Amino acid sequence: MSDTNKKDEIVHDHNHDGIDRRGFLKCMAWAGTGAFCVIKGGVLKSYSLSRLAEISDKDAQGELSFVQISDSHMGFNKPANPDVTATLKAAVDKINALASPPEFMLHTGDISHLSKPGEFDNVQEILKSAKPKDVFYVPGEHDVLEDNGAQYRERFAKGSKGDGWYSFDKRGVHFIGLVNVMNLKAGGMGNLGQEQLEWVEQDVKQLSKSTPIVVFAHIPLWSVYPDWGWGTQDSAQALGYLKKFGSVTVLNGHIHQTMQKVEGNVTFHTAASTAFPQPKPGSAPSPGPMKVPDDQLRGLLGITDVNYVRHQHALAVVDSSLA
Amino acid sequence: MRRAFYIASICAILAMSLPRLSVFGADDKPAAAEVKIDNFSFTPATVTVPAGTEVTWINRDDIPHNVRNDDASIKSKTLDTDDKFSFTFTKPGTYTYFCSIHPKMKGTVVVK
């Protein structure tokens, strides 16, 4: 939290009152603290998890709620987390314990560690025990090894376009699942590609500007830390097609920590991993798995719970640790 | 007679051994170089080797990586921790490569 915001709270106005908020950045919530976000009447509020007790049930509920999980890395067995199965199960327990059951889940990629059939099987089996039965996936770079994502699409994205992108509507909210882990170029970052960008432009063309939009993809669609490749080269073009919309929420994974940014009409949010934490940008020689004391691990892993409140065109985002 | 046979045997053994000695001689051993993958980087980032050198990459990270070049003439499978990949460079030139899973990782092999 910045010094100017000692109450662990950010406020962002979506009311189009002419104030230019491009580049506006007030809150970065790191793993371990987590964040709870509510937007009401166009105003977004974000609270650190330590203040969850102060938020009423009414504030935490909406007409649409869903959960985001990410980076389960099934098959990973190194010291940073020798038991990713147990932590994924803990995430499911956490989801099943939520006061208002979410309608569905989003998995923002790196389902598996090495794209092995057994790893995918294991995740699918564990997620069957979650109360929400529908899971919408996008691939991480670990899910498309060796076969350019053929197995991933067969299992998780049947009927999708191109490398696996698609959109769907839930209670008036338009969801767009994008693929930015294919055809990566030497020295570059995440990549959407021209074909997918053209599809996004067409996909949102007919929507009214009051439609709330949720975009989800694996690698962040904003430049978190280009030195580590934590960004998507052509994301600005995709977000350009979403400028007319009053409320756009972008959900990503990949960086194994929670982080938020508000820029204009767009709220960016990354989810924690259910498997292992990664260091803060630039705080380590490389973005490799971070070994933390065993008793701290679950506090750095987590799930994200999102609520949509009708008529307020707003999404509330809650990060919960697995601790 | 017996001594003559003994000498002949020694000569025969020597004759058989000589070509083997040259096959296994230090001068004919194929050149080799190793590149370590650690902390999301190739070390050394540039290796300079004579033509015919077999370069071996070994992944010492907790995360899988691979070795690719733009035209995919060099293309390893995904290397999990401690997996190795070898490629013999027969023609002189400068070969740049990267990890297509983490494309910020780049390296160069200069073949003289």
Image (cartoon, coloured by chain):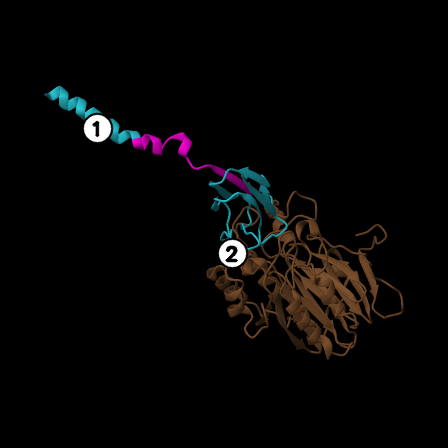
Chain colours: A brown, B cyan
Mark seen at residue A7: none
Say yes or no: labels 2 and 1 on the same chain. no
Label 1 sits on a secondary structure element that is helix
Whether residue A36 sits left or right of residue B84 in the image: it is right
Q: The disc labelled 2 sits on which kind of residue?
A: Leu
Residue A200, by quadrant, is bottom right
In magenta, the rendered stretch is: B19-37
Q: The disc labelled 1 sits on which kind of residue?
A: Ala
Compared to B54, does A214 lie above or below?
below
Neighbourhood count class around disc 1 (C-alpha, 10 Å): few under 14, some 14–19, many 20 upward: few
Residue B27, by quadrant, is top left
Label 2 sits on a secondary structure element that is loop
The residue at which mark 2 appears reads as A114
Mark 2–mark 1 distance (CA, rounded to whole Å):
56 Å
The answer, for residue A109, to whether it is visible in the render is yes
Residue that appears at 49% across and 60% down: A119
Whether residue B1 sits left or right of residue A106 in the image: it is left
Compared to A58, does A7 lie above or below?
above
Outermost residue toward the top in this view: B3
Whether residue A15 sits left or right of residue A32 in the image: it is right
Residue at mark 2: chain: A
Compared to A82, does B50 lie above or below?
above
Query: Whole-percent x and y of residue A222?
Result: 72, 59
Near-viewer residue (A47 or A277): A277
Give the label, 2 or 1, closer to the camera: 1
Query: Whole-percent x and y of residue A6?
Result: 83, 52
The answer, for residue A72, to whether it is visible in the render is no
The residue at which mark 1 appears reads as B12
Query: Whole-percent x and y of residue A167?
Result: 64, 74
User: Magenta span has B36?
Assistant: yes
User: Magenta span has A88?
Assistant: no
